[in-house]
């Protein structure tokens, strides 16, 4: 599996299942990602993301986005595009 690091989880809101990601590379709706902390991980497709409270289809490195996450995560989980 080829993967490239795109983000790090900076915060997780467990009640709504949303993680805040600090992007290190561009991310698009429809991208397949791997979310991991080197012990546990899971894959999912980016179905939607928000930037400053607005839905966006693409986000760039350096931006902080909100992303609905399928499973519970913690700060410093790493996100890879696969």
Image (cartoon, rainbow, N blue to C red):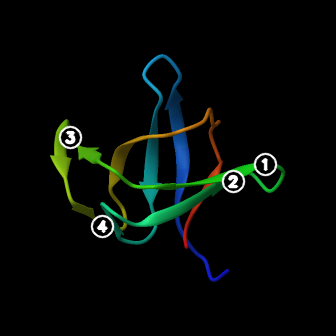
Q: Position of residue 17 (x, y in %)?
A: 47, 28
Query: Where is mark 4, residue-wise?
Result: 60
Whether 6 is drawn above or below 72: the answer is below
Q: Residue at x 63, y 37 (%)?
A: 73
Residues at marks 1 and 4 touching, judged by CB atoms closer than 8 Å: no
Image point 21% across, 59% down: which residue?
57
Q: Identify the mark nearer the N-term, 1 or 4.
A: 1
Q: Which residue is mark 2?
A: 36
Mark in the foreground, 1 or 3: 1
Q: Is residue 6 left or right of residue 58?
A: right
From the image, tell me which residue sits under label 1: 40
Q: To which residue does mark 3 refer?
A: 52
Question: What's the distance in space between the residues labelled 2 and 4, CA to CA?
Answer: 21 Å
Looking at the picture, tell me which residue is in the foreground, 45 or 49: 45
Q: Are marks 2 and 3 in contact (CB under 8 Å)?
A: no
Sequence order check, earlier mark of 2 and 3: 2
Seen in the image, is 76 located left or right of residue 46? right
Q: Nearer the viewer, mark 2 or mark 4?
A: 2
How packed mark 4 is, by other alpha carbons closer than 10 Å (few <14, some 14-19, many 20 or more), is some
| Inter-mark Cα distance, 3 to 4 | 13 Å
Q: Residues within 10 Å of mark 3 (few under 14, many from 20)?
A: few
Q: Residue at x 29, y 48 (%)?
A: 48
Could you tell me if the residues under marks 1 and 3 are in contact, i.e. CB atoms within 8 Å?
A: no
**Which is nearer the N-term, disc 2 or disc 4?**
2
What percent of the width, then of the height, locates residue 25?
42, 72
- The x and y percentages for residue 36 are 69, 53
Q: CA distance from mark 2 to mark 1?
A: 6 Å
Q: Residues within 10 Å of mark 2 (few under 14, many from 20)?
A: some
x and y percentages locating residue 6 in the rendered image: 50, 67
């Amino acid at each position: 599996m080829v993967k490239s690091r795109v983000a790090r989880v900076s915060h997780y809101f467990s009640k709504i299942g949303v993680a805040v990601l600090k992007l290190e590379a561009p991310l698009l709706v429809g991208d397949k990602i791997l979310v991991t902390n080197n012990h546990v991980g899971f894959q999912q497709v980016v179905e939607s993301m928000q930037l400053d409270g607005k839905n966006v289809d693409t986000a760039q490195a350096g931006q902080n986005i909100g992303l609905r996450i399928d499973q519970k995560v913690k700060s410093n989980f790493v996100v890879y595009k696969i």
